[in-house]
């Protein structure tokens, strides 16, 4: 319902609202818009699409293949040869390939070994890689890696989405801070205006000196100056926030004056950022997207190492084909009519193969070091952030107490002033101290929020 109301405000600004009408956009609603419509988030989805396309490409290596080879030569009304060779191949998971073939040859100068019956010759056979390429081959490795790339892409996408959500969250917190700063100056400007009007009236009836009106006006203008500074900061932060708000048709949205942040964000931040269930003792970093991405990368490199190890074996390819003139009769295919072949090749020094294997091992070792380093880095970052959060909670309690005490002192000083027992200078001094304390409390709250955002960025949880 809140999202619907926000959509009404953002899309249909032509509606007539009262000047003091406002609509609150919470952090959860804001992040929902960012996650759904922001172009960079949509761009992150392309990572998965790309990995799925690569997986489809890898599966293409197992597609059945139809091949036709036709060759003919005719010169001076003499047909030298007319050769047709059509085959249908089916690659399988291991280094085995099934093959069916039809061959038809004719011609005056045909090679004798190509002579076949007039109706053509059919063959059904198999090609097997007996050593290199049997248990590990390129097409098998590419398909396994393609499946891992899809899983890795999903983990990388989550990291990328969480990164943009983290930046958007910091922008929202800055927007909230500038809004709270502006509210502080607005409230104290009202106090300064009332005080100035009262002192001016007392001066006009002769109850106060002219210097008091001057001091009251200085305080009033100082409040106006600070309010204007805070207002322009709020405007800038609103425009920065608008950078993350888009519609479904890639149209950017500009935050209007009647849209304000949720001032009770402190109460819902853990639920929104999904950081409330943090338990350091039982935290499983293996489920972290960064660790998962590295795990998939490690598995992919392990497959690459296995392939390079297999390439050290000699290349032994065996072909065996049953021949027949009458393929419609299954019994016509027998061991009495066949065509076979054996191909063996083996580099003497294996320098290329050994170098490829060494590079694969180095990549694997590099990824293993990265996994260990990333795990420790994540753990230490989480420990540091949680201690920082505990400190900000303590600082927040102190500043709240200070604000209450300054507020009490200001109330007492104002009562003394109206009883003629104090001066305007002391009242303004007390009020300035209270303003500073409130601004300090807002700053500490903002630091707490930013640290929560950092925790969200490190944990990279899923935001619904």
Image (cartoon, rainbow, N blue to C red):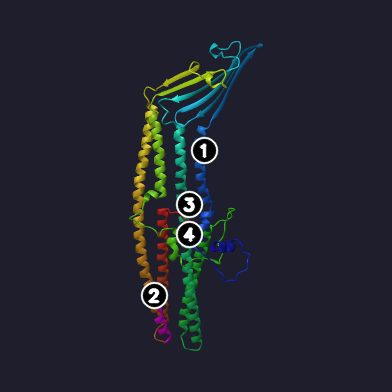
Dot 3 alpha-carbon crowd within 10 angstroms: few under 14, some 14 to 19, many 20 or more: many
- Percent position (x, y) of residue 415? 41, 84
Give the residue number, with chain letter if any, for mark 1: 56
Q: Specify the quadrant that holds the N terminus.
A: bottom right
Earlier residue among tags 2 and 3: 3
- Earlier along the polypeptide chain: callout 2 or callout 4? 4
Which SS does the magenta portion mostly show? helix
In the picture, the disc for residue 313 is none
Which-is-in-front pick, marks 3 and 4? 3
**Mark 4 Cα shell of 10 Å, populated few (<14), some (14-19), many (≥20):** many
Q: Which residues are magenta?
A: 410-419
Q: Earlier in the sequence, mark 1 or mark 3?
A: 1
Q: Earlier in the sequence, mark 3 or mark 4?
A: 3
Q: Is residue 415 magenta?
A: yes
Q: Which residue is mark 2?
A: 404
Q: List the residue tagged with mark 4.
A: 171
Residue at mark 3: 161
């Amino acid at each position: 319902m809140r999202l619907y109301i926000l959509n009404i405000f953002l899309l249909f600004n032509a509606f007539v609202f009262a000047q003091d009408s406002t609509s609150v956009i919470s952090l959860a609603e804001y992040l929902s818009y960012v996650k759904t419509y922001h172009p960079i988030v949509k761009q992150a989805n392309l990572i998965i699409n790309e990995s799925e396309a690569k997986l489809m490409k890898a599966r293409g290596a197992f597609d059945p293949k139809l091949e036709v080879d036709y060759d003919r030569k005719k010169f001076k009304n003499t047909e030298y040869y007319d050769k047709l060779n059509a085959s249908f191949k089916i690659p399988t998971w291991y280094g085995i390939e099934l093959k069916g073939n039809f061959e038809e040859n004719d011609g005056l100068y045909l090679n004798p070994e190509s002579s076949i019956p007039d109706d053509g010759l059919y063959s059904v056979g198999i090609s097997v890689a007996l050593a290199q390429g049997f248990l590990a081959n390129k097409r098998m490795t590419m398909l396994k890696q393609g499946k891992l790339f899809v899983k890795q892409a999903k983990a990388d996408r989550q990291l990328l989405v969480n990164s943009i959500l983290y930046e958007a969250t910091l922008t929202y917190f800055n927007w909230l801070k500038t809004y709270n700063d502006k509210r502080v100056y607005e409230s104290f400007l009202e106090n300064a205006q009332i005080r100035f009007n009262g002192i001016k009236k007392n001066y006009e009836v002769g109850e106060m000196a002219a210097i008091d009106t001057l001091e009251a006006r200085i305080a009033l203008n100082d409040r106006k100056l600070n309010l204007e500074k805070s207002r322009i900061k709020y405007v800038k932060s609103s425009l920065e926030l608008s950078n993350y708000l888009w519609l479904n048709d890639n149209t950017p949205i500009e935050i209007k004056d009647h849209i304000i942040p949720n001032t009770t964000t402190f109460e819902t931040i853990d639920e929104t950022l999904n950081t409330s269930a943090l338990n350091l003792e039982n935290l499983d970093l293996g489920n972290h997207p960064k660790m998962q991405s590295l795990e998939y990368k490690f598995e992919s490199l392990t497959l690459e190492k296995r392939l390079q190890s297999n390439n050290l074996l000699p290349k032994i390819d065996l072909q065996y084909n049953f021949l027949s003139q009458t393929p419609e009769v299954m019994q016509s295919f027998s061991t009495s009519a066949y065509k076979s072949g054996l191909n063996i090749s083996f580099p003497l020094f294996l320098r290329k193969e050994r170098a490829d294997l060494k590079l694969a091992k180095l990549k694997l070792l590099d990824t293993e070091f990265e996994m260990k380093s990333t795990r420790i880095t994540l753990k230490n970052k989480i420990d540091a952030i949680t201690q920082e959060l505990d400190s900000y909670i303590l600082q927040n309690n102190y500043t709240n107490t200070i604000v209450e005490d300054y507020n009490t002192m200001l109330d007492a000083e104002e009562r003394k002033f109206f009883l003629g027992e104090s001066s305007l200078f002391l009242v303004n001094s007390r009020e300035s101290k209270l303003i500073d304390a409130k601004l300090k409390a807002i700053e500490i709250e903002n630091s707490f929020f930013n640290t929560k955002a950092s925790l969200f960025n490190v944990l990279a949880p899923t935001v619904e």
